[in-house]
Image (cartoon, rainbow, N blue to C red):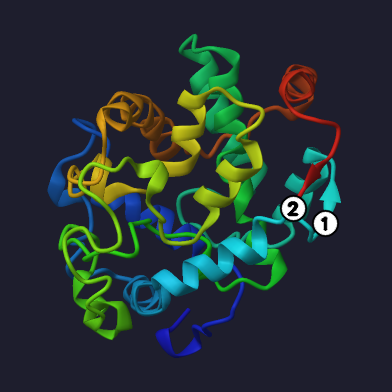
C-alpha cells in the first residue's frame, strides 16, 4: 500500500506492518545478525512512517480523554469472547510477508508458547486475549488510534519514542500545560495515574481488570509501551510498584514478538483447553 493510499480513517490495513516493524526494531537476541534486518531509519515500507506521522499528530491529551469517555463505557456491543475473535478476524489483513495466519491463530501461537514454558494459566490467558482490543477498528477507529507504540500524554514526549520528530505536528508540544517533563503529573506518581496514548492496550486492560491478576493486567496495559520497557524513558513517572510489575511485562513481550510461525496451531486439538480456560476466568459474554 502506498502512502498516498493510507486514509486517516481506514481500518486495520497496516497492523501487520507495525508488528513486522517491531521485530525489526527489537529483534530476538542472538538469532539474527543486526545487518539482516532492514534499517529502521530507511524502512522499506513508507506506510510505517505515515502511520506514526498520524499517530504522533493526533494522540493528544484531550483526544485520549475523549476516547476514554467514549469507549470505556463498554456500550458498543455484547458478545461471547469467541464471537469477538471471529469478529476481529473479519478485518485482519492477510498480506503479512511472515505469516498468513489470522489474528486468532497468532494469539494461539502466543499463548501456546507461554503454556509450553509452564507459566500459570492466567498468563496463558493473557497471551490469548492481549490483542483482542483491536476490535476497536471495527467500531470505526482509525488504525493510528488502535495499534502502534504507546506513550504517556499530558507531559513532554520522549525522544526515545519512535519517530519523535513527528511530534512537531502535535499541539500538545506547544502547550505549556503538557510540554514539560512532568506536565500534568507529579514525580514518580505511578503509571496508574498516567494517561497513555489511546489504543488496544488500554482498552483490553480496562475490559479485563476484574478478571485477571495484576501481573497480567500490567502485561495487557503496557505491552506496547516500548519507550519504557525497552528504552527506560519514563522512569520519572513510575513508582516502585510499577518497576516490580514491569518484570512481568518484560516476561511477556518475547512471547508476543517472537512466537510467529508459518505453522498454524491445531485448533481442534486446542479447543477444549482454551474454552475451559476462558470459562474459568471470564464471564459468558463480554461488553465492548
**Who is closer to the viewer here, 30 or 69?**
69
Residue drawn at the location 49% of the way across and 58% of the way down: 16
Which numbered circle lies on residue 217? none
Q: Position of residue 242 (x, y in %)?
A: 32, 32
On screen, residue 244 above or below 153: above
* Spatial CA span between label 2 and label 1: 5 Å
| Residue 177 x, y percent position in the rendering | 27, 73
Q: Is residue 53 left or right of residue 128?
A: left
* Residues at discs 2 and 1 in contact (Cβ within 8 Å): yes
Q: Give me the residue at 48% from left, 73% from top.
A: 63
Crowd band around label 2 with a 10 angstrom C-alpha radius: few (<14), some (14–19), many (20+)? many
Residue on which disc 2 sits: 288
Q: Residues within 10 Å of mark 1 (few under 14, many from 20)?
A: few
Q: Which label sits on residue 77?
A: 1
User: Which residue is outermost to the top?
Assistant: 118
Query: Residue 256: horizontal and vertical position, in percent?
Result: 44, 37
- Vertical relation: 162 (above or below) 51: above
Whether residue 245 is situated above or below residue 77 in the rendered picture: above
State which quadrant residue 94 falls in: bottom right
Tell me what residue is drawn at x 54 percent, y 53 percent.
200
Q: Sequence order check: which comes first, mark 2 or mark 1?
A: 1
Amino acid at each position: 500500500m502506498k502512502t498516498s493510499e493510507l486514509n486517516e480513517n481506514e481500518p486495520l490495513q497496516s497492523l501487520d506492518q507495525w508488528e513486522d516493524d517491531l521485530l525489526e526494531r527489537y529483534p530476538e537476541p542472538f538469532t539474527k545478525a543486526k545487518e539482516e534486518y532492514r534499517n529502521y531509519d530507511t524502512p522499506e515500507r513508507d506506510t510505517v512512517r505515515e502511520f506514526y506521522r498520524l499517530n504522533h499528530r493526533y494522540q493528544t491529551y484531550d483526544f485520549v480523554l475523549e476516547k476514554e469517555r467514549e469507549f470505556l463505557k463498554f456500550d458498543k456491543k455484547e458478545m461471547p469472547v469467541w464471537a469477538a475473535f471471529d469478529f476481529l478476524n473479519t478485518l485482519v489483513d492477510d498480506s503479512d510477508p511472515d505469516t498468513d495466519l489470522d489474528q486468532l491463530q497468532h494469539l494461539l501461537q502466543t499463548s501456546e508458547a507461554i503454556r509450553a514454558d509452564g507459566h500459570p494459566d492466567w498468563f496463558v490467558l493473557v497471551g490469548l486475549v492481549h490483542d483482542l482490543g483491536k476490535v476497536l477498528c471495527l467500531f470505526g477507529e482509525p488504525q493510528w488510534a488502535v495499534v502502534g507504540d504507546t506513550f504517556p500524554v499530558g507531559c513532554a514526549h520522549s525522544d526515545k519514542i519512535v519517530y519523535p520528530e513527528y511530534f512537531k505536528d502535535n499541539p500538545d508540544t506547544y502547550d505549556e500545560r503538557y510540554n514539560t517533563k512532568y506536565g500534568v503529573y507529579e514525580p514518580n506518581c505511578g503509571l496508574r495515574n498516567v494517561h497513555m496514548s489511546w489504543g488496544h492496550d488500554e482498552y483490553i486492560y480496562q475490559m479485563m481488570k476484574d478478571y485477571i491478576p495484576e501481573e497480567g493486567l500490567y502485561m495487557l496495559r503496557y505491552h506496547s509501551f516500548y519507550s519504557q520497557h525497552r528504552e527506560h524513558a519514563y522512569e520519572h513517572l513510575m513508582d516502585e510498584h510499577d518497576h516490580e510489575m514491569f518484570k512481568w511485562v518484560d516476561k511477556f513481550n518475547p512471547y508476543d514478538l517472537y512466537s510467529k510461525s508459518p505453522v498454524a496451531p491445531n485448533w481442534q486439538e486446542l479447543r477444549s483447553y482454551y474454552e475451559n480456560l476462558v470459562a474459568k476466568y471470564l464471564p459468558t459474554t463480554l461488553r465492548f
